[in-house]
Image (tube, grey):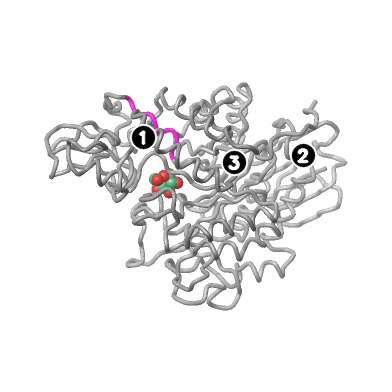
C-alpha cells in the first residue's frame, strides 16, 4: 500500500524553478537581465504554478564564470541592481506565495575577492592559509588534479610569492580552505546575512568539494583526466555540512539546503543527506546524463530509491540547468521533451525546472565570435523570449547572447495564447501534481512494461496515479491499465477519456 497522506515540509512537495538572472528579464535595457527584470516577471512563475525560485548568483563578481566567481558575498553586482532590488523581489515573491533560494558559492571565491587579494599579497599574509597554497617548482603542479574548464591543471603558479594555489575551476576561482576555522566563520556569516534578509534557503554550489584531504593526494591515474570537482568526496565534508545546517536551523521557518553534489554516482550523492542532518535535498545528475531510453531511466529511478529510501533521503529530479545542453536539445524533439516533462513532474521527489524548459526552448547555436563562457555552456543560457514581436520583451541593447531558435513561436506570449502549447502542458502537470497526494508524497512502484515504455504507479492513501512514458518513437501497447482514465497526456491526446491501451509515439500519460 502507499503511504498515508501527512503534512510534510514544503520543500518535499515543492517544484523549484531555476532562474539564470542574466538571461531572464532586463529592466534597464543594457542587454543583461537583472533583479528588477525578474520581479516584473513574477506573475509568470505564479501563473505556471511553481513553489520556489532559485536564483543563480547575482553577487558582486568580475564575471569570469558569470557570477560563480564571487568578490563580495553580501552585495548585489551593479549589473543586477542593488540590495534594495533584492529585498523588493523577495517581498513580492513571498506575497505571491513563492519561496526564494539563493545560490551560495562556498568552495571558491573570485581572485578579486579581498580575501584572496590579501592572501596572495605575501606568504606572511594573515589570510595566506584561507586558500590552498603549496610549495613546488613552476613546471610541476603539486598533484594531478584537473580543473573543470579548459583541460588544465587545477593549480596556478603565483610568480610573486613562488607558490601554487588550488582552483578546481578557473584560475580566477581560487578554492577556499575549509579546514581553516576562520574561513568557516566568515562563510557562515555570509549565510546569516541572507537568512536575516529572509531567504528561504540556498542552492549550494559544488558542496561535495568543501572538504579537502590535508595532503591533497593524487587521484588514481585512471581517474586523473576527470575534473577533480566531480571526484572530491572527503569524509570531512559531512561535518562541514552539518555545521552549515545548524546555522540554518538557528532561523525560524523551514529553510532549505539544496546542494549541488557534482559526483556522478547516486550512492555517493545520497551520503550527503547524512542522518537527516546534512542537506535537505541534493542534486543527483546521473538521470540528467542518461539517454532518453526507458531502460536507462528505469535503472536511474530504481537507483534513486535504492540509495535514498533507506536513509529517509528525499530525491530530486532535474533535466536541464545552466551547465548542460537543454533536454529539448539532447532528446531531439518537442514530443520527447513533453514526455520528459511528464516524467520529471511525476517521479517521487522534488523536481527542479530550468527557466525556458516550459517553453520547449532549444539551445542556441552560438556563432564564432559570440562565445563567452569558458566552459562552453552559452547555448542553454540564451535569453527568455517573453513577447512574440522583437525584441521579445527585452528592449534596449541587444541581449548578451543570441536568441534561442524560433523566439517568436516559443515566446511566453505566443504559447500562453495556445492551449495546446508545451507551456500549458507544464501548467497542467503542475496543477495535477499539486492536487494529488500520490504525486506529491506517495510511494513509487515500477511496473513491468514492454521495451521502450517506463511504467510506474504512485499511491498515497486512497489516491493513486499510474504513469506511462513511451521513450520510443513508435506506438506501444500497454495491456495492464484497462479502465483507467487519461488525466494528462504529453501531447494532449485523449485527456478525460478512458485509456485504450495504446501509447502514441513518444507519448507519456498520467492515468487516474
Ligand atoms: C557549479 C555551477 C557552475 C559553475 C561551477 C563553479 O557547477 O553550477 O555553473 O561554473 O559550479 O562555480
Circles 3 and 1 in contact, beta carbons < 8 Å: no
**Front of the two marks 2 and 3:** 3
Give the residue pinned by disc 1. Answer: 183
Closer to the chain start, of discs 2 and 1, is: 1
Closer to the chain start, of discs 2 and 3, is: 3
Closer to the chain start, of discs 3 and 1, is: 1
Q: Main secondary structure of the magenta part?
A: loop
- Determine whether, in the image, residue 503 is placed left or right of residue 36: right
Residue 243 visible within the image: yes
Numbered tag placed on residue 317 in the rendering: 3
Q: Residue 166's spot in the image, x, y percent?
A: 27, 38
Tell me if residue 500 comes above or below residue 89 in the rendering: above
Residue at 45% of width from left, 59% of height from top?
379
Magenta segment includes 21: no
Mark 1, other Cα within 10 Å: few <14 / some 14–19 / many ≥20: some
Q: Secondary structure at mark 2?
A: strand
Which quarter of the rendered picture does the N terminus lie within?
Answer: top right
Q: Residue 236's spot in the image, x, y percent?
A: 41, 23
Q: Secondary structure at mark 1?
A: helix
Give the residue pinned by disc 2. Answer: 466
Between residue 415 and residue 235, name the one nearer to us. 235
Circles 2 and 3 in contact, beta carbons < 8 Å: no
**Front of the two marks 3 and 1:** 1
Amino acid at each position: 500500500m502507499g503511504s498515508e497522506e501527512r503534512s510534510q515540509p514544503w520543500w518535499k512537495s515543492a517544484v523549484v524553478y531555476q532562474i539564470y538572472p542574466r538571461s531572464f528579464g532586463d529592466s534597464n535595457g543594457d542587454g543583461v537581465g537583472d533583479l528588477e527584470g525578474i520581479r516584473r516577471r513574477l506573475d509568470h512563475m505564479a501563473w505556471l504554478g511553481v513553489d520556489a525560485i532559485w536564483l543563480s548568483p547575482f553577487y558582486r563578481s568580475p564575471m569570469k564564470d558569470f557570477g560563480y566567481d564571487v568578490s563580495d558575498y553580501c552585495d548585489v553586482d551593479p549589473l543586477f541592481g542593488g540590495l534594495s532590488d533584492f529585498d523588493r523581489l523577495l517581498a513580492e515573491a513571498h506575497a505571491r506565495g513563492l519561496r526564494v533560494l539563493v545560490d551560495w558559492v562556498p568552495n571558491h571565491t573570485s581572485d578579486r575577492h579581498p580575501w584572496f587579494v590579501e592572501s596572495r599579497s605575501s606568504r606572511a599574509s594573515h589570510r595566506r592559509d584561507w586558500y590552498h597554497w603549496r610549495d613546488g617548482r613552476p613546471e610541476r603542479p603539486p598533484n594531478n588534479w584537473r580543473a573543470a574548464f579548459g583541460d588544465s591543471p587545477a593549480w596556478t603558479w603565483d610568480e610573486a610569492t613562488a607558490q601554487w594555489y588550488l582552483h578546481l575551476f578557473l584560475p580566477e576561482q581560487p578554492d577556499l580552505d575549509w579546514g581553516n576555522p576562520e574561513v568557516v566563520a566568515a562563510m557562515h556569516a555570509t549565510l546569516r546575512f541572507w537568512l536575516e534578509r529572509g531567504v528561504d534557503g540556498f542552492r549550494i554550489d559544488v558542496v561535495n568539494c568543501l572538504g579537502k584531504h590535508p595532503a591533497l593526494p593524487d587521484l588514481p591515474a585512471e581517474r586523473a583526466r576527470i575534473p577533480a570537482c566531480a571526484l572530491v568526496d572527503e569524509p570531512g565534508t559531512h561535518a562541514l555540512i552539518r555545521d552549515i545546517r545548524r546555522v540554518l536551523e538557528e532561523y525560524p521557518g523551514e529553510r532549505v539546503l539544496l546542494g549541488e553534489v557534482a559526483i556522478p554516482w547516486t550512492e555517493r550523492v545520497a551520503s550527503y543527506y547524512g542522518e537527516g542532518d546534512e542537506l535537505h535535498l541534493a542534486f543527483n545528475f546521473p538521470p540528467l546524463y542518461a539517454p532518453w531510453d526507458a531502460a536507462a531511466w528505469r535503472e536511474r529511478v530504481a537507483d534513486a530509491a535504492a540509495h535514498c529510501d533507506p536513509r529517509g533521503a528525499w530525491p530530486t529530479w532535474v533535466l536541464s540547468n545552466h551547465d548542460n545542453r537543454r533536454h529539448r536539445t539532447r532528446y531531439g524533439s518537442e514530443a520527447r521533451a513533453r514526455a520528459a516533462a511528464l516524467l520529471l513532474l511525476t517521479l517521487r521527489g522534488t523536481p527542479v525546472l530550468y527557466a525556458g524548459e516550459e517553453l520547449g526552448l532549444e539551445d542556441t547555436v552560438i556563432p564564432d565570435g559570440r562565445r563567452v563562457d569558458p566552459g562552453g555552456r552559452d547555448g542553454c543560457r540564451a535569453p527568455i523570449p517573453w513577447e512574440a514581436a522583437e525584441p521579445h520583451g527585452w528592449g534596449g541593447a541587444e541581449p548578451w547572447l543570441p536568441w534561442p531558435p524560433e523566439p517568436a513561436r516559443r515566446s511566453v506570449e505566443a504559447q500562453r495564447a495556445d492551449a495546446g502549447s508545451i507551456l500549458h502542458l507544464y501548467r497542467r502537470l503542475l496543477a495535477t501534481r499539486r492536487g494529488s497526494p500520490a504525486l506529491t508524497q506517495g510511494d513509487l512502484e515500477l511496473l513491468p512494461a514492454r521495451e521502450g515504455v517506463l511504467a510506474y504507479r504512485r499511491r498515497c492513501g486512497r489516491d493513486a496515479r499510474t504513469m506511462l512514458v513511451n521513450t520510443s518513437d513508435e506506438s506501444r501497447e500497454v495491456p495492464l491499465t484497462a479502465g483507467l482514465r487519461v488525466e494528462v497526456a504529453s501531447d494532449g491526446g485523449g485527456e478525460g477519456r478512458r485509456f485504450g491501451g495504446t501509447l502514441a509515439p513518444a507519448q507519456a500519460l498520467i492515468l487516474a
